[in-house]
Image (cartoon, rainbow, N blue to C red):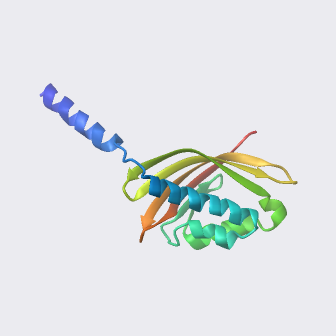
């Protein structure tokens, strides 16, 4: 009985914690989209920045004030909180880690720095990306500010 439980636990653990390799092509695609978002932000173009997100009601953005569901609501949140160039500042991303959870799902952890005249901000983010019709999109964004 103990042996079959141990074998079952082993296979369960392997299935739950196994990771897929991120292909070079997929890794480069995700990084390219992320840094395009950085450039779009630094141009003050929230609409272009939002093209990195899946345009779906399934999208979720989680921040300090809780989750926001849907592409339109996420866009509205960005436009409300970053209504002018002074509030947007200059954004810089650093990528810390990237893993594939499946052939069509990648998780990316990173750090952001926002340089602004009204006060800098920085923190960490976890993005879950989904591949739809051969293109990667953010389906879940959890961003948390941290102290410098």
Going 84% across and 50% down the picture, which residue do you hit? 119
Going 51% across and 60% down the picture, which residue do you hit? 29
Write down the quadrant of residue 132 in the picture.
bottom left
Q: Image check: 142 left or right of 1?
A: right
Residue 104 visible (yes or no): yes
Q: Image check: 7 left or right of 57?
A: left
Point out residue 25 in the picture as x, y percentages from the top left corner.
46, 57
Q: Image check: 127 left or right of 79?
A: left
Going 58% across and 60% down the picture, which residue do you hit? 32
Write down the quadrant of residue 18 in the picture.
top left
Q: Residue furthest front?
A: 24
Write down the quadrant of residue 40 in the picture.
bottom right
Which corner quadrant holds the N terminus?
top left
Point out residue 124 in the picture as x, y percentages from the top left corner.
63, 46
Going 72% across and 46% down the picture, which residue do you hit? 122
Nearer-the-camera pick, 40 or 81: 40
Point out residue 83 in the picture as x, y percentages from the top left corner.
78, 68
């Amino acid at each position: 009985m103990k042996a079959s439980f141990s074998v079952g636990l082993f296979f369960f653990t392997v299935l739950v914690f196994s990771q897929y390799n991120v292909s070079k092509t997929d890794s480069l695609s995700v990084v390219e989209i992320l840094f395009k978002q950085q450039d779009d932000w630094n141009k003050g173009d929230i609409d272009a920045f939002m093209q990195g997100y899946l345009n779906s009601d399934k999208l979720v953005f989680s921040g300090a004030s809780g989750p926001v569901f849907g592409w339109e609501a996420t866009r509205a949140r960005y436009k409300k909180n970053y209504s002018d160039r002074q509030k947007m500042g200059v954004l810089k991303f650093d990528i810390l880690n990237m893993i594939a959870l499946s052939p069509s799902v990648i998780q990316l952890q990173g750090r952001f720095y926002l340089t602004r005249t009204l006060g800098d901000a920085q923190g960490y983010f976890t993005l879950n990306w989904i591949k739809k019709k051969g293109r990667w999109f953010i389906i879940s964004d959890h961003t948390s500010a941290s102290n410098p």
